[in-house]
Image (tube, rainbow, N blue to C red):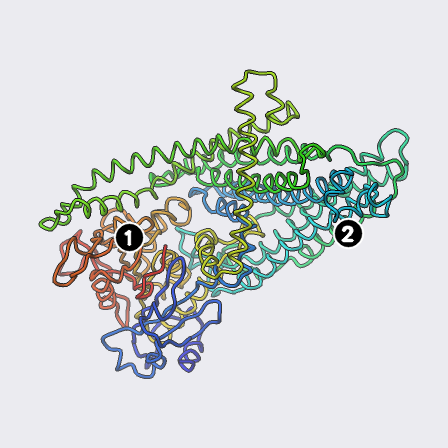
């Protein structure tokens, strides 16, 4: 096999034409879906060998097929099966548990790719990307500000400055003026400077995680080819789309600098405010003004970097902006060092009382995030109006809605940590002022939000129950002559109705994000106008209103605490338990398909490794053998297969057949990411590959039809597969057949039939001529498939 690889690597990857002496052997390249699968399962053989790749992602063959290129006569009537296994890209070692901290960053990065398609609106598209990048920057500042609130304000300023709290937590005793008898670290500025090590360490951890994954993912170079060969219907075919290392490096430098500047401001601002009091030291006052001016200049520089044009996709951009990437974080680190020195200077008479002015910081972040989301909604609406499509989720407002949820998630996580730490430090509830009032207001709006979500879920459940009742007649019609078991019919109908809930996800996201925006605005207004917690602000009003405020405040605090405990427990379990880590990996499989274009601290884009892997494998095979390649993708594997096909040169793309099953290409990606997987993009893919066939079931909650218009629709989509295969017991199925839903597509005879027709349609010399239906079929009937199994297993979950 290694000899075959060396033979396949002698020419350029873009040359896919047949070569003299090529074998014409067919290849079936299987790509699994979310949750992963072993090569043994995919190839249905316990003896497999790794053909190429590493421990993270690799291509496998059965041991008996290792030297298939040297025995072409043995593969005249069947293909050589290969399995591409990429599950370790998302569910590898225990460090993946740390990625739970990055969940808001991942969600806001998704919003970047959810923009509606646009034609001739390049400036509006750039504005959309800019607004999402700015929203991502506010999330970084929010996370670090929350860490500063916990370490600097609650622990070092309030608890260490209060004798009762410091005595209750002996590990803070050396910071307390009373407990330590005026020790060196007991001065307020020095306590703040020491506590700043916590948010600074968090910043270093985020920087390290981003750098480490950047080297493993974004540094994987795709094939270089002529930009003129790009397909005009989607950016996924551009040479530089899956090579975002320059943008990630630039954004990482900007976000790291922003985080360090936030820590510096948390230490310098209280000291500067003290120095400005009447009679304060003039020298320190002047130094404080200079330091704050430098911090503002650093913030302007960060904004300038973030506002620069985002990605260069039309070519492989190998430059790295090395001076910027190095100097901006180092400059911010130097300002932090100066801030620590300035804040830790001896100031006689300075004592800590009350809380640090965090309300202004958190209130400003919340206000900016709300304005950014509203502006993003306006821009998305303008883009959607240029090329409206009926299937686009939320009429093009999916991106702003998801960005709103990302901001809300960041606020809940930040406020939850502050609330829990405050309750832990202040055991009696009387010695500390606690976190900023705004965080308490934000916690108090969680119960009413949950009430709205529960009511919405109840309405969806009722609608699903009605649909399930209506589906019973359809089930009996599909199994005419077999039906007769009411319980069996009810289970099948319920599975179909439950699968349809996926299509109602836009309604859930729309309602949740809209209510979150309104409640968040109310919380911000209440905190700024009253400067008191909800329970205190409603004191003296109607008893019902005051009781509701007290209940919401207490319940919100407990819910945040419960969520924080679950979060830590889940992360700890994921670090130790491989199966739990794989469950978390399923979330990343869906959320980290896209490059990090909006936030550099988001979990890494596994497709920047997987898509080049698949593209190189397909290109070298078609060049070495003269063609005949079926790429078969299940679930998320079908999305990777389509993205890899777009990356091929047109000449190689025409020699590839595509078989997808349980595929979310249109049902999820086409609706939520219309600019890249919309009808025009999927239609162009159908025209550019040799042939394409798609299989789905009505019981599948993830996969669905591709829904191409006109004759292309039935040419790609086969009629829905029966599920279950048989209604009752038969000679071939003496035991009841299970309802398969999203798994085991290879168990259906239609799978092998479509796969064989795809292989028969391919030619060894030239691509097969395109036609609407095979000669033995009437126009409009299902025609030859275009893809091969994701792996014979197809067992991997969505």
Determine the residue positioned at 56% across, 55% down: 98
Please give the label number shown on residue 334.
2
* Residue found 62% across the figure and 31% down from its top: 438
Q: Quadrant of residue 248?
A: bottom right
Relative horizontal placement of residue 432, taking residue 777 as reference (left or right)? right
Q: From the viewer's perspective, is residue 13 above or below residue 561?
A: below
Q: Is residue 401 left or right of residue 655?
A: right
Residue 486 in picture, x, y percent from top left: 16, 44
The residue closer to the viewer here, 22 or 42, is 42
Mark 1 vs mark 2, foreground winner is: 1
Local SS, label 1: loop
Q: Judging from the image, what secondary structure is the residue with disc 2 in?
A: helix
Instruction: Answer few, some or many: residues within 10 Å of disc 1's Cα (few below 14, many 20 plus, some between 14 and 19).
Output: many
Is residue 474 among what the camera can see? yes
Per the image, the residue denoted by label 1 is 741
Circle 2 packing at 10 Å, graded few (<14), some (14-19), many (20+), is some
User: On residue 457, which mark appears?
Assistant: none
| N-terminal label among 1 and 2 | 2
* Placement of the C terminus among the 4 image quadrants: bottom left
| Nearer to me, 771 or 63 | 63
Distance between mark 1 and mark 2 Cα atoms:
57 Å
């Amino acid at each position: 096999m290694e000899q075959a690889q060396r033979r396949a690597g002698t020419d350029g990857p873009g040359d896919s034409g047949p070569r003299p002496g090529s074998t014409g052997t067919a290849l079936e390249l299987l790509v699994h879906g979310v949750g992963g699968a072993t090569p043994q399962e995919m190839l249905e053989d316990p003896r497999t060998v790794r053909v190429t790749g590493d421990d993270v992602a690799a291509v496998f063959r059965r041991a008996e097929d290792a030297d298939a290129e040297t025995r072409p006569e043995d593969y005249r009537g069947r293909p050589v099966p290969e399995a591409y296994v990429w599950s370790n890209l998302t569910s590898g070692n225990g460090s993946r548990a740390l990625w739970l901290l990055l969940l808001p960053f991942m969600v806001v990065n998704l919003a970047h790719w959810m923009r509606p398609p646009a034609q001739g609106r390049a400036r509006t598209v750039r504005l959309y990307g800019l607004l999402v990048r700015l929203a991502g920057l506010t999330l970084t500042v929010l996370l670090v500000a929350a860490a500063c609130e916990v370490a600097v304000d609650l622990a070092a300023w309030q608890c260490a400055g209060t004798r009762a709290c410091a005595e209750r937590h002996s590990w803070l005793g050396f910071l307390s003026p009373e407990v330590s008898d005026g020790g060196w670290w007991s001065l307020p500025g020095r306590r703040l400077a020491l506590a700043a090590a916590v948010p600074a360490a968090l910043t270093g951890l985020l920087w390290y995680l981003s750098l480490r994954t950047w080297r493993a993912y974004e540094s994987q170079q795709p094939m270089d080819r002529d930009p003129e060969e790009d397909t005009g219907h989607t950016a996924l075919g551009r040479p530089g789309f899956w090579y975002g290392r320059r943008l990630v490096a630039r954004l990482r430098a900007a976000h790291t600098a922003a985080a360090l500047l936030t820590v510096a401001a948390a230490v310098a601002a209280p000291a500067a405010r003290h120095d400005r009091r009447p009679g304060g030291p003039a020298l320190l006052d002047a130094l404080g003004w200079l330091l704050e001016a430098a911090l503002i200049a650093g913030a302007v520089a960060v904004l300038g970097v973030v506002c620069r044009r985002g990605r260069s996709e039309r070519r492989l951009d190998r430059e790295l902006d090395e001076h910027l990437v190095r100097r901006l974080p180092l400059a911010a680190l130097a300002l932090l060092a100066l801030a620590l020195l300035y804040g830790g200077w001896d100031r006689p008479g300075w004592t800590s009382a009350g809380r640090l002015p965090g309300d202004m910081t958190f209130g400003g972040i919340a206000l900016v995030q709300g304005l950014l989301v509203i502006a993003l909604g306006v821009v998305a609406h303008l883009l959607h109006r240029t090329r409206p499509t009926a299937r686009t989720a939320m009429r093009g407002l999916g991106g702003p809605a998801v960005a709103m949820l990302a901001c809300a998630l960041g606020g809940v996580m930040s406020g939850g940590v502050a609330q829990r730490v405050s309750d832990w430090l202040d055991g009696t509830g009387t010695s500390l002022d606690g976190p900023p009032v705004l965080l308490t207001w934000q916690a108090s709006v969680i119960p009413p939000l949950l009430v709205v979500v529960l009511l919405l879920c109840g309405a969806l459940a009722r609608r699903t129950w009605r649909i399930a009742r209506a589906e019973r007649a359809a089930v009996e019609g599909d199994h005419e002559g077999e039906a007769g078991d009411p319980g069996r019919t009810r289970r099948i109908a319920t599975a179909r109705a439950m699968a349809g809930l996926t299509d109602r996800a836009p309604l859930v996201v729309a309602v949740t994000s809209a209510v979150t925006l309104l409640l968040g605005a109310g919380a911000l207004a209440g905190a700024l106008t009253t400067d008191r917690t909800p329970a205190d602000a409603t004191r003296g009003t109607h008893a019902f209103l005051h009781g509701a405020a007290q209940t919401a405040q207490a319940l919100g605090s407990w819910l945040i605490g419960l969520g924080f405990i679950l979060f830590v427990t889940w992360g700890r379990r994921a670090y130790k338990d491989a199966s739990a880590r794989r469950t978390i990996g399923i979330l990343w499989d869906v959320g980290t398909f896209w490059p990090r274009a909006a936030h550099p601290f988001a979990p890494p884009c596994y497709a920047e490794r997987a898509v080049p892997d698949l593209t190189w494998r397909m290109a070298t095979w078609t060049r070495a053998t003269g063609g005949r390649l079926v790429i078969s993708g299940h679930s998320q594997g079908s999305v990777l297969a389509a993205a890899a096909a777009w990356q091929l040169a047109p000449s190689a793309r025409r020699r590839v057949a595509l078989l997808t099953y349980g595929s979310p290409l249109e049902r999820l990606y086409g609706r939520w990411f219309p600019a890249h997987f919309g009808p025009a993009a999927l239609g162009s893919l159908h025209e550019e590959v040799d042939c394409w066939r798609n299989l789905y079931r009505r019981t599948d909650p993830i996969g669905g039809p591709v829904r191409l218009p006109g004759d292309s629709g039935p040419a790609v989509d086969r009629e829905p597969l029966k599920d279950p295969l048989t209604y009752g017991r038969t000679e071939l199925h003496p035991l009841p057949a299970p309802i398969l839903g999203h798994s085991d597509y290879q168990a259906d005879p239609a799978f092998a039939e479509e796969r064989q027709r795809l292989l028969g349609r391919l030619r060894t010399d030239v691509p097969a001529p395109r036609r609407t239906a095979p000669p033995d079929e009437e126009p409009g009937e299902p025609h030859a498939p275009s893809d091969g199994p994701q792996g014979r297993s197809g067992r991997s979950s969505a």
